[in-house]
Image (cartoon, coloured by chain):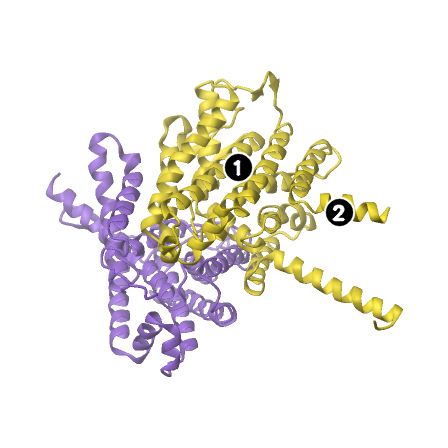
């Protein structure tokens, strides 16, 4: 393995991390506050991505074919629709909590899982109703250019995404650490009832968490679907499943753990095929990856960076 | 006549086994009505009947074991792809192929069981999801299933018709198998949950520590629950392969596991009849009812909203709804009687 290979693996891992970290953070936020695994995280993001794509398409229609064809001239043409998409996911996330989860607070975890699954079905059904029958939509990258860094070609789009998600994640961590909202989230995460007794408006904390998770999911979906070049209602499923694995690998008990897990996961995703390809076993890399995760979780059931919770009887 | 009914017929009709056999009989009748029934309804009934078996197995895990596993898809996959591989490419008899699938699923479910001893709660759901993903990846990478879709028994390579005891089985012929297996698995699950095993599982669900203090062997019952649910899942897979004659790994992933979970929760985790209703709501309702109304994409939305509403307002499942209706019916009956004959 040469130096360039190692650099390429690391950069690929970082690029994968930029999407996965956003998705993972949304899932962790909801797990902490609503104590359920949110299977609708991906769909929530996809809703935002569809909105963005729709808003960009609206900007221009080709006279010749009647199909939308947009020439991006100023960055605002991309940024405003993106903000629109993020807003839609933000509001839908808020509504989901206010309408559904606030009323299902004291049901058990499996029931909440089913509710999120029902949400997936509803959103999957809603998308064609709102955005028209076409199952695939165009997605838009920030820039088509590619720069070469230490001999490794890198699309500018992914670099911008990386910077954006790094900024956002640091920003949210600061919020969690230093603002009243962050203190509230941490209190609700440790015990919702006691947090309520201490005068924290748990309803507001929960709905804001859902909204922020939706916005993060939307940003992840917008940038990721642009990078892979296709947008359909199922394109975030893999990302979401990986986010779950990352979360249990790092451990749900801290906010930092799942992100570390996400980085380990993307590194392994880049590393395993590179190693296995010389043994002619590249298709099996996912199998080995999942086995490695499960062995890690079996050795440390609370996650690599998790704290063990001792239950009082 | 009335006395005869009350003393002889009623105890017989009230026996649970009578109901189970009736389900089998209904399936058999449906099989012979294949030309009369609308094809959508027929398909919905058949799909419900084989996924019901997987649902029953899963109910043992969730309702009695308290283990929210998301690995059901793996076992269905083992059943379906195992049957296909062993029957078609190794050219074994049908029963041997089914047995191989069952043995494989027992081995893998034991692995699931050991994992569940160390991990619990939401973590278990994700870890079992990962385990089933491993199985799916393995199925994908076995060369003969290029990219994880079996061509079924019909296309690609030398086709081999399904033959059982010298008779060629048609698609509809496999419905007879379904009837047999549905009755069998209903009986097995009913007997298990009304026996000390069921009570031991419930005790473990409520508190592992307390159950162990009372002398319940955690390992034994956990493994038992996983093995039975695994075997029932693989039987569901075998039956789906026999009916559809085709399988794809995209149908046994996370979405399928969630669907089974939803079916069990919507129906009522502890009720055999409830799960039947839940399975129909999830797997059959769309096909049998909504699509015939030609709602298009609205059918998906309605189905999703229905799931959310049932789960939110009937945490005991649809079977609770039936119980409530029965209660209401009795109250109305009593009121009517009072109106006609005056208060007692």
Residue B261 vertical position relative to residue A24 in the rendered view, above or below: above
- Neighbours of disc 2 within 10 Å: few (<14), some (14-19), many (20+): few
- Neighbours of disc 1 within 10 Å: few (<14), some (14-19), many (20+): many
Asked if one can make out residue B313 in the rendered structure from this viewpoint, the answer is yes
Q: Depth check: B319 or A16 in front?
A: B319
The answer to which image quadrant residue A282 occupies is top left
CA distance separating discs 2 and 1: 33 Å
- Give residue A293's mark: none
The answer to which image quadrant residue A212 occupies is bottom left
Mark 2 vs 1, N-terminal side:
2
Which chain is drawn using yellow? B
> Whole-percent x and y of residue A278?
20, 32
- Give residue B236's mark: 1
Q: Colour of chain A?
A: purple
Compared across the picture, whether B195 is left or right of A170 comes to right
Residue at 69% x, 47% y is B292
> Whole-percent x and y of residue B11?
72, 46
Task: Provide the chain ID for the residue under circle 2.
Answer: B
Query: Which quarter of the image is occupied by the C terminus of chain A?
Result: bottom left
Residue B239 vertical position relative to residue A309 in the rendered view, above or below: above
- Give residue B10's mark: 2
Residue B91 vertical position relative to residue B74 in the rendered view, above or below: above
């Amino acid at each position: 393995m040469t130096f360039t290979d190692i650099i390429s693996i690391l950069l690929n891992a970082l690029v994968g991390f930029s999407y996965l970290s956003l998705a993972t953070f949304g899932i962790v936020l909801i797990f902490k506050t609503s104590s359920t695994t949110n299977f609708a995280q991906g769909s929530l993001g996809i809703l935002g991505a569809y909105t963005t794509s729709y808003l960009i398409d609206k900007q221009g229609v080709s006279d010749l074919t009647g199909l939308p064809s947009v020439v991006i001239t100023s960055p605002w043409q991309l940024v405003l629709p993106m903000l629109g998409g993020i807003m839609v996911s933000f509001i839908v996330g808020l509504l989901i909590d206010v309408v559904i989860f606030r009323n299902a607070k004291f049901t058990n975890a499996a029931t909440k899982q089913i509710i999120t699954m029902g949400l997936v079905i509803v959103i999957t059904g809603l998308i064609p109703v709102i955005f028209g029958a076409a199952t695939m939509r165009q997605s838009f990258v920030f820039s088509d250019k590619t720069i070469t860094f230490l001999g490794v070609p890198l699309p500018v789009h992914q670099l911008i995404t990386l910077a954006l998600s790094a900024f956002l994640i640091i920003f949210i961590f600061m919020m969690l650490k230093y603002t009243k909202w962050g203190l509230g989230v941490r209190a609700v995460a440790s015990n919702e009832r006691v947090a309520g007794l201490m005068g924290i408006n748990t309803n507001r904390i929960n709905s804001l968490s859902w909204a922020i998770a939706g916005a993060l999911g939307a940003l992840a979906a917008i940038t990721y679907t642009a990078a892979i070049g296709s947008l359909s209602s199922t394109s975030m499923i893999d990302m979401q499943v990986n986010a779950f694995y990352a979360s249990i690998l790092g451990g749900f008990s801290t906010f930092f753990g799942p992100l570390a897990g996400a980085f380990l996961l993307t590194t392994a995703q880049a590393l395993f095929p590179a190693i296995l390809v010389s043994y002619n076993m590249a298709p099996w890399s996912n199998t080995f990856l999942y086995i490695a995760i499960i062995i890690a979780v079996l050795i440390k059931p609370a996650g690599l960076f998790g704290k063990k919770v001792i239950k009082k009887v | 006549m009335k006395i005869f009914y009350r003393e002889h017929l009623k105890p017989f009709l009230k026996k649970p086994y009578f109901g189970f056999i009736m389900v089998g009989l209904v399936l058999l009748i449906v099989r012979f009505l294949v030309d009369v029934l609308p094809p959508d309804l027929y398909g919905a009934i058949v799909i419900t009947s084989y996924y019901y078996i997987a649902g029953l197995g899963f109910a043992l895990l969730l309702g009695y074991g308290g283990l929210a596993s998301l690995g059901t898809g793996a076992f269905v996959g083992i059943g379906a792809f195992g049957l296909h591989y062993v029957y078609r490419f190794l050219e074994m008899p049908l029963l041997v192929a089914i047995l191989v699938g069952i043995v494989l699923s027992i081995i893998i479910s034991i692995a699931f069981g050991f994992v569940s001893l160390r991990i619990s709660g939401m973590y278990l759901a994700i870890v079992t999801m990962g385990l089933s993903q491993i199985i799916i990846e393995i199925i994908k990478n076995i060369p003969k299933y290029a990219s994880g879709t079996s061509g079924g028994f019909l296309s690609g390579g030398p086709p081999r018709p399904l033959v059982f005891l010298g008779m060629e089985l048609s698609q509809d012929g496999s419905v007879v198998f379904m009837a047999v297996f549905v009755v069998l698995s209903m009986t097995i699950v009913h007997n298990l949950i009304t026996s000390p095993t069921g009570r031991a599982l419930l005790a473990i669900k409520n508190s592992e520590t307390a159950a162990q203090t009372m002398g319940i062997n955690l390992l034994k019952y956990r493994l038992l629950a996983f093995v039975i649910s695994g075997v029932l899942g693989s039987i569901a897979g075998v039956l789906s392969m026999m009916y559809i004659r085709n399988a794809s790994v995209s149908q046994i992933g996370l979405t399928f596991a969630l669907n089974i979970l939803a079916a069990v929760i919507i129906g009522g985790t502890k009720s055999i009849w409830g799960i039947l209703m839940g399975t129909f709501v999830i797997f059959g309702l769309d096909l049998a009812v909504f699509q015939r109304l030609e709602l298009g994409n609205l059918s998906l939305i309605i189905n999703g909203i229905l799931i959310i509403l049932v789960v939110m307002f009937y945490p005991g499942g649809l079977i609770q709804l039936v119980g409530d209706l029965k209660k209401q019916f009795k109250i109305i009956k009593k009121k009517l009687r009072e109106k006609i004959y005056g208060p007692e």
